Image (cartoon, grey):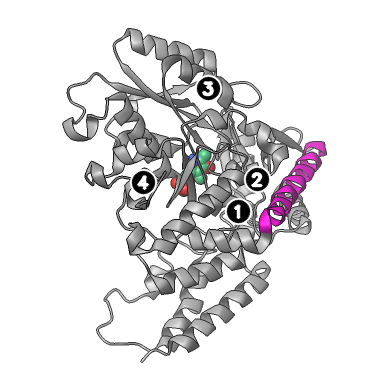
Amino acid sequence: MIDFRTWARRAADWSADHFANIRDKPVRAQVMPGDIARQIPTNPPEHAQDMAAIFDDFEKIIVPGMTHWQHPRFFAYFPANASPPSVVAEFLTASLAAQCMLWQTSPAATELETVTMDWLRQAIGLPEGFCGVIQDSASSATLCAVLTMRERALDWQGNSAGLANHSQLRIYCSAHGHSSIDKAVRIAGIGEDNLVKISSDGPDQAADTGALATAIQNDLDAGLIPAGIIALTGSTSTGASDDISAICDVAERFGLYVHVVAAWAGSAMICPEFRHMFAGAERADSITFNPHKWLGVNFDCSAHLVRSPQDLTRTLAIQPEFLKTGGRDGIIDYSEWSVPLGRRFRALKLWFVLRAYGLEGLRTMIRNHVAWSQELADEINAHENFELTTQPVLSLFSFRYLPANTQDADALNERLLQAINDDGRIYLTQTRHNDQYVIRFQSGQFQATRDDVQFAWKVIQEIARSLES
Ligand SMILES: *Cc1c(COP(=O)(O)O)cnc(C)c1O
């Protein structure tokens, strides 16, 4: 018999200790490929094992093989922050273990999802007229958007007749568009060759909307079928952002669907002073952003706001027309709004977090991350041996180490990054910008403090100096 109460308490204590002591652990797992698997039997257990032994192995084998995304000195990739109320709600969700595909399979889950998504709509300053659904990821939301573009462009015949009897559909996005767009276009049967990537120079790295309009017109002239445009607010790599208003102008001219991806940066739109980045989003057909990145809600929780739930359900619902309610009146069956049928109760953690901190508490967190990052960017910029390679977009910027007489800057920065991550006190990742190897920095961890960000600068300088000797 497993004493659930004992082990649930043990897990709670472990988690609290983990959050309290996490600064002492290396950020990136310091293991080699195979190190973990080697410690686990290759055959499944035939007989019950003691929970104490299982928990022991979790601590001994698994935890050292984890890269700690909740570490306040995690400055790599993007934030995926988990606040304590979110983790508590996730535990309750796991205990309820409901399948939330239909209203009647869990009315509270459905109704809380509708309400909390409307809270988020208001929180990021969008007008009424958008309805929300929680997807597992921004990738899924974008896939849903691309499928909707496809169906709208084919007069809703694609799902039944397939794509064979039409000329090629065309989707447009910036050259900085995320790989999830390529994947969505593949899966939707449109074909990656029909994803047109528009060049994006200039300081914001925004897609050139003149080139966008020309590309669409050329496709029309060639007898192809433009289906939609995907706009970007805050690329993962360097924060590249499109001019959504200008993109919507082009879309209106050609009658095209616009989907906005703001997976990371969208959370910052709860702060009015950052919404200039989002100007025009209110004119889009759909928007996705991830509270599971920067709003303290642990993965998975991707907000997907749509202007026309009817178009979304017409694309994805597989029930007869007479059962559809489109989200305006009566009930919502959220499985008609997403690709999988089964759905987790994701709204609970969002509700806990929004209530436990209030929007004002979350704004303070984001404003701090942005301010600390920008302060660090200024310091790096002022140092003679370093240069900023992209200016801060919210809390994200990139830089290079470039001491006098550097021969091969790419190799030097690669070496620096590796040394920093082998050291383990902080964690950073790289990208390529203007064909150069650059080091990225972002701050967005829930427990991060100004000291943690300043500590990163100390470690970067110390390790850079050690490379010279
Ligand atoms: C993180 C990110 C994604 C992918 O988000 P998932 O929720 O992991 O699918 C897509 N686009 C951008 C711009 C992102 O930052």
Q: Earlier in the sequence, mark 3 or mark 1?
A: 3
Q: Earlier in the sequence, mark 3 or mark 2?
A: 3
Disc 1 marks a residue whose amino acid type is Leu
Residue sitting at x 60%, y 73%: 18
Q: Residue furthest bottom?
A: 1
- Residue 247 is marked as 3
From this view, report whether residue 180 is shown above or below residue 15: above
Q: Earlier in the sequence, mark 2 or mark 1?
A: 2
SS state under label 2: helix
User: In the image, residue 189 lies at what x, y percent?
Assistant: 26, 33
Which segment is the magenta one? Answer: 358-383
Q: CA distance from mark 2 to mark 1?
A: 10 Å
Q: Which residue is mark 2?
A: 270
Q: CA distance from mark 2 to mark 4?
A: 25 Å
| Front tag of 1 and 4 | 4
Residue sitting at x 46%, y 75%: 61
